Amino acid sequence: MTVASTGIWALLEAIAFSFKRHIEVFHELGLPEKRVFITNGGSKSTLWRSIIADVAGYDLTYVTGVHQSAPPSSPAWARALWMKRLFKERQAGE
């Protein structure tokens, strides 16, 4: 591995640890995962999906053709709160 590729790999792992933290936040909110899905962006890369799965410790389900419902530029915490609200609304409707 070159210095540049080592730096890129470290950056991808740092992002993967952030993804893992998102899952932990859902646990803390009382929303444990049943399955973990990944879609769009870098998830098209099998290497990227492999890094995320290894770091997060989950089997990931890769989904194609999904329209993103939360803007990618929104902060992770805002997306988590939005997902919690959506989850509660769906539960109330059942």
Image (cartoon, rainbow, N blue to C red):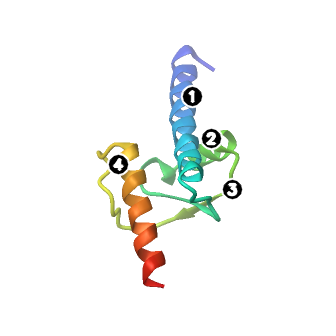
For marks 3 and 4, give the one nearer the viewer.
4
Q: Which residue is mark 2?
A: 51
What residue do we see at 43% from left, 52% from top? 80
Mark 3 and mark 4 residues within 8 Å of each other at the beta carbon: no
Of the numbered discs 3 and 2, the one sitting upstream in the chain is 2
Q: Find numbered disc 1 in the image and state the secondary structure of the residue it sits on.
A: helix
Q: Find numbered disc 3 in the image and state the secondary structure of the residue it sits on.
A: loop
Mark 1 and mark 2 residues within 8 Å of each other at the beta carbon: yes
Of the numbered discs 1 and 2, the one sitting upstream in the chain is 1
Rounded to the nearest angstrom, the CA distance separating label 4 from label 1 is 27 Å
**Residue 16 seen:** yes
* Local crowd size for mark 4, using a 10 Å CA cut-off: few (<14), some (14–19), many (≥20): few
Q: Which mark is residue 9?
A: 1
Q: Which residue is mark 3?
A: 59
Of the numbered discs 4 and 2, the one sitting upstream in the chain is 2
* Local crowd size for mark 2, using a 10 Å CA cut-off: few (<14), some (14–19), many (≥20): some
- Point out the residue furthest to the bottom here: 94
Of the numbered discs 4 and 1, the one sitting upstream in the chain is 1
For marks 3 and 1, give the one nearer the viewer.
3
Mark 4 and mark 1 residues within 8 Å of each other at the beta carbon: no
* Local crowd size for mark 1, using a 10 Å CA cut-off: few (<14), some (14–19), many (≥20): some
